[in-house]
Image (cartoon, coloured by chain):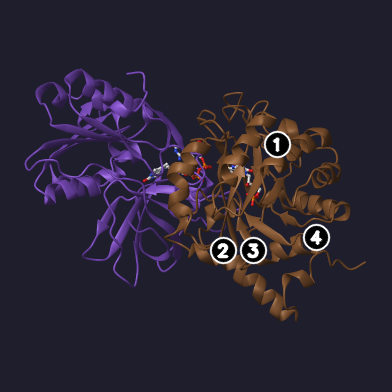
Chain colours: A brown, B purple
Amino acid sequence: MKNPVMTASGTFGYGVEFADFVNLEDIGGIIVKGTTLQPREGNDYPRMVEMASGMLNCVGLQNKGVDYFCEHIYPEIKDIQTNMIVNVSGFSIDDYAECAARINALDNIPAIELNISCPNVKHGGMAFGVTPEGASAVVKAVREVYQKTLIVKLSPNVTSIADIALAVQDAGADAVSLINTIMGMVIDIEKRKPVLSIATGGMSGPAVKPVAVRCVWQVAKAVHIPIVGLGGIMTAEDAIEFFLAGASAIEIGTANFIDPTITVKVANGINDWLDRHGCKSVNEIVGQLDG
Amino acid sequence: MKKYVKDLMVAAVEFPHECYVLLKLTDSEPLPEMLPGQFVEVKVEGSPKTFLRRPISINYVDRENNQLWLLIKKVGEGTQKLAELKVGDKLNLVFPLGNGFSSVQEKGEKVLLVGGGVGVAPLLDYGKYLKDNGASPVFLLGARSKSDLLEQALFKAIAPVYVTTEDGSEGEKGFVTQHTLLEKERFDRISVCGPKPMMMSVARYAKATGTPCEVSLENMMACGLGACLCCVEKTVKGNVCVCKEGPVFDINDLTWNI
Ligand SMILES: Cc1cc2nc3c(=O)[nH]c(=O)nc-3n(C[C@H](O)[C@H](O)[C@H](O)COP(=O)(O)OP(=O)(O)OC[C@H]3O[C@@H](n4cnc5c(N)ncnc54)[C@H](O)[C@@H]3O)c2cc1C
Ligand SMILES: Cc1cc2nc3c(=O)[nH]c(=O)nc-3n(C[C@H](O)[C@H](O)[C@H](O)COP(=O)(O)O)c2cc1C
Ligand code: FES
């Protein structure tokens, strides 16, 4: 990886949407929109609501399905010279495995991020992500058919994220990424109705950062595989917090909406910070909390 | 069309009405190509409650003075903050976004431009474009009362303007769809921007008279770039992003019950 900065799924499209603003090849990795075996229309509008220092969304995995991805989108992005990673979601173990197997066949996709943690679909990914047994079963099935780098994305909406991370590691994951959005709800008090079409949605943005840092720190103590940290990162300093908590790479999500050039700014800012602190690489600070 | 993220400088701040502000922005370089009906996403500084950028239509592009105009209605904290900007301040924009209104289809075509409230904003630029390119635009503008009618002199300098106000203080009393112009004349096509109920009633008129009609939608947006899929509208082709495939849609592509 050129640098430890990647884009979070669902916030950066397929990368090409941002090509006017940043050189995509200056980003360590681009994790594209959640992809499912079958096409999905997603949830009804309204799908987003703003809050102080963040937002909630309930997009609901709208995408054209993995076959469309392979035929029409992959050719458009396969020559972008960085790690193009596909975020895979599903509704059954077979769905996940089948989807992963089809992406395994694409030469220029070096990794997938398995989303077992989407809060915005009924009976969807999160059902697997909330118990160690469920998480383990999905990861095992995917591991059998998927030979490249397998990153598993974890939900913070659980009692013990470290237990899930351990189960996922034991089932064969190469890395974990966390956190996905935190389930929340906003009510329009005049209409006495939830603002979002499905009532609840996933919170993201700077408001969730302390929760994310805490999760990374807990998971880092439990597993030995690499951790990708995300949740509310807006600046290089935010990213450094994640490294110190135990992440060796990070993803930037909602911040892309505020500044479409944020990825490159954070990547440069991380280098500056490391220089100022006499460090040669991020590895020197991963998990290096004092005391 | 290439998109930019850029700090523009506030060259003028005008208050056509206590609830509105007109920001005239400029840059040291010539402003990029923009189409009428496209919009910008502005970053609001100094308002902790305003986290996301705010989508605002391109009101007018004054090439002579290298100015981009934004006509903004104060409805909440973000737009209030924008109204507090001073000459010389910087405003960060992501632009130009969206598809824009249809280009001229035929020389001399009669195009009715219907605007309500702050929805008149993009019609100024569009009307100018149509006139400059050989079409014959006609404006039909609606407002609550006379003082809510914005940029009237500028509209009149481009094309004939018909007006309705809800209280009858200017033009005909009532809503735009009740204007007698619609009974007397037929148009080659119609473009509308305004509150959704108004756009729906104009769409109904268009359908009844067999006139092609496009509307400019204002769904809530996050990225403005077609990346987050938050701003979708149901269409005959499924859910599509208003920020990218729109904001302008042919009414036949929407699933409105009209
Ligand atoms: C493509 C597009 C073009 C637009 N062009 C203009 C324009 O030229 N001039 C202008 O004044 N406004 C325009 N708007 C609407 C403008 O974006 C909102 O009024 C603004 O975001 C409100 O921000 P706020 O922080 O002041 O209000 P908030 O505190 O966020 O909200 C105040 C009230 O405004 C409503 N509101 C917020 N966002 C929107 C929205 N996107 N559409 C409708 N209602 C909204 C909220 O429901 C709430 O009731 C446009 C919107 C879109 C999507
Ligand atoms: C609009 C939107 C859509 C998202 N879609 C997905 C998705 O398809 N798959 C996924 O794993 N995460 C998705 N996420 C979650 C983000 O990838 C990320 O985990 C979360 O937003 C926290 O990071 P942030 O605070 O930097 O945005 C989405 C988030 C947002 C805001
Ligand atoms: S606002 Fe993100 S896709 Fe339209």
Instruction: Tell me if label 3 and label 4 are in contact, CB under 8 Å.
Output: no
Q: Residue at x 53, y 47 (%)?
A: B77
Name the secondary structure under disc 4.
loop
In the picture, the disc for residue A183 is 1
Residue A94 location, x and y as percent?
66, 30
Front residue (pair B175, A81): A81
Question: Can see residue B164?
Answer: yes
Q: Amino acid at mark 3?
A: Thr
Q: Earlier in the sequence, mark 3 or mark 1?
A: 1
* Amino acid residing under circle 1: Met
Q: CA distance from mark 4 to mark 2?
A: 21 Å
Location of the C terminus of chain B by quadrant is: top left
Name the disc covering residue A27, or none.
Answer: 2
Q: Find disc 3 in the rendering and name its residue.
A: A235
- Cα–Cα span, label 3 and label 4: 17 Å
Tag in front: 2 or 1: 2
Q: Position of residue A121 (x, y in %)?
A: 63, 30
Alpha carbon of mark 4 to alpha carbon of mark 1: how far? Answer: 24 Å
Residue A101, by quadrant, is top right
The subunit letter for the residue under badge 3 reads A
Q: Nearer the viewer, mark 3 or mark 2?
A: 2
